[in-house]
């Protein structure tokens, strides 16, 4: 491979068959900017979006309750009371973060503003894994419930 005459003309080789090259045919027309607070049309509405958020929050609480009851047995109410007490102590922090950073992104957005981008990215990856695990658990619970209604239905 011949050496490029300038660094901008370099084509960098990656493992496998992929390469990255400098893009030279970008459009030079000005970009139209819109303000974030410009009248965005809300498609879901207040009731539907509140229902979705409420479902997300309460489903986690219900899963944790069932798991705690399984492992802690008769001591599950004590374990859940301890969790509620700890969350109660952190309520002001949650309120402060929610008002200081009213953007989407949750843990990633908070960590991006307080730590390094690598740590924030790691938290984002773990959050995605958590959502995937929640989807799998939800699907299993739904199929188990449906199996109780219709015994001929295969859970798997």
Image (spheres, helix red, strand yellow):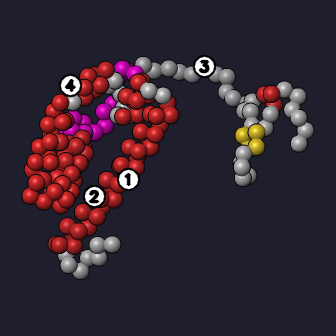
Real-space Cα distance between discs 3 and 1? 40 Å
Residue farthest along the bottom direction in this orientation: 152
Residue in the image at 10% along x and 54% along y? 75
Q: Residue furthest right?
A: 2
Q: Which segment did they paint magenta?
A: 36-50
* Cα–Cα gap, marks 1 and 2: 10 Å
Confirm whether the magenta stretch covers residue 63.
no
Q: Earlier in the sequence, mark 3 or mark 2?
A: 3
Disc 2 to disc 4, how far (Cα)? Answer: 30 Å
For marks 4 and 1 on the same chain, the one whose residue lies earlier in the sequence: 4
- Residue position for label 4: 92
- Element type where label 4 sits in the image: helix
Q: Are marks 3 and 2 in contact (CB under 8 Å)?
A: no
Residue at numbered disc 3 = 30
Other residues around mark 1 within 10 Å, as few (<14) / some (14–19) / many (≥20)? few
Residue bearing mark 1: 132
Residue 48 in view here: no
């Amino acid at each position: 491979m011949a050496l490029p005459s300038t660094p901008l003309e370099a084509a960098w080789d990656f493992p496998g068959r992929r390469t990255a090259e400098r893009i030279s045919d970008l459009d030079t027309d000005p970009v139209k900017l819109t303000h974030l607070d410009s009248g965005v049309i809300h498609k879901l509405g207040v009731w539907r979006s509140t229902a979705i958020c409420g479902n997300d929050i309460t489903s986690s609480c219900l899963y944790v309750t069932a798991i705690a009851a399984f492992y802690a047995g008769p001591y599950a109410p004590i374990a859940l009371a301890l969790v509620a007490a700890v969350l109660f102590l952190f309520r002001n922090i949650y309120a402060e973060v929610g008002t200081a950073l009213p953007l989407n992104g949750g843990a990633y957005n908070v960590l991006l503003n307080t730590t390094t981008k690598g740590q924030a990215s790691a938290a984002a990856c773990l959050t995605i894994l958590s959502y995937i695990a929640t989807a799998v658990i939800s699907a299993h619970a739904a199929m188990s419930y449906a199996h109780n209604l219709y015994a001929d239905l295969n859970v798997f």
